[in-house]
Amino acid sequence: MIGTLIVIAKAPVPGRVKTRLVPPLTYSQAADVARAALTDTLQIASTVPAATHLLALDGRPGPWLPTGWRLVDQPQGGLDARLAAAFAAVRPDAPALLIGMDTPQVRVDQLAAFDPVRHDAAFGPATDGGFWALGLREPARAARLIPGVPMSVPHTGAVQLERLRQAGLDVQLLDQLTDVDTIAAADEVARSAPSGGFARALAGLRVPA
């Protein structure tokens, strides 16, 4: 079983989240989409068996935060430093799986697939060249494996995966998913999970599918 399931996220505040969706969305609409993505992600993650569910948050929590979640603030710095800090906030002797808020279409079985008994790490590639999930049997390794990885570039995932393999870890590859970064990607995600809150929120904004 996963010791800690981590979701790393930004609070859905207009002008601070999903700004690449503007235009065609307004900043307020982009924040609504982000809130729906975060809500779906947290609801799905809540059902995954784990000793602890942890939200590493940039901003203040809102009514979208389910009960039973431990909350920690993200530190200042680049995304690589913030990812490493999220792993540092968990028990070092229990496996941890970290995901973001940008894949609200993720399924419970895709999260529960991480097998830290058979594998040292898990890696979930994203279609844009990044990654949506990173699991570590020994979370303390994150301090050496993540800092310095270039983030938000087309080769982010390739660099991170190579870091894991160069460290001699046996890496379990998870399903490839699409991040909600552009309107086209948002439409694709909504089509893949049409019954979710994210799809309903996007449809309510009359964004063409």
Image: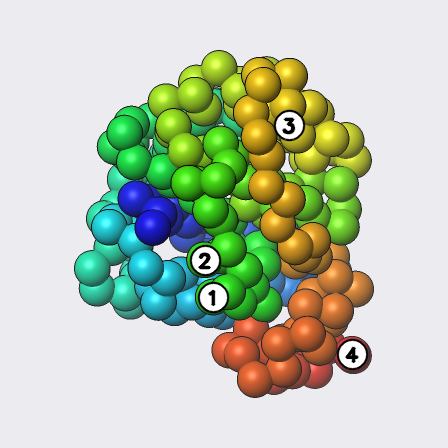
Helix, strand or loop at disc 4?
loop
Helix, strand or loop at disc 3?
helix
State the mark number for residue 108: 1
Residue on which the image places disc 4: 209
**Mark 2 residue type:** Ala
- Name the mark nearer the viewer: 4 or 1: 1
**Mark 3 residue type:** Gln
Instruction: Give the answer, above or below, for where 45 lies relative to 3.
Output: below
Q: Residues within 10 Å of mark 2 (few under 14, many from 20)?
A: some
Q: Are marks 3 and 1 in contact (CB under 8 Å)?
A: no
Q: Position of residue 197 (x, y in %)?
A: 51, 78
Q: Position of residue 156 (x, y in %)?
A: 70, 31
The number of numbered discs placed on residues in the rendered structure image is 4
Helix, strand or loop at disc 2?
helix
Q: Are marks 2 and 1 in contact (CB under 8 Å)?
A: yes
**Mark 4 residue type:** Ala
Q: Residues within 10 Å of mark 4 (few under 14, many from 20)?
A: few
Q: Give 99 or 198, whichever is nearer the viewer.
A: 99
* Mark 2 and mark 1: Cα distance apart in space: 6 Å
* Mark 4 and mark 3: Cα distance apart in space: 32 Å
Closer to the chain start, of discs 4 and 1, is 1
Residue on which the image places disc 3: 160
Residue on which the image places disc 2: 112
Locate residue 133: give its quadrant.
Answer: top right
Closer to the chain start, of discs 2 and 3, is 2
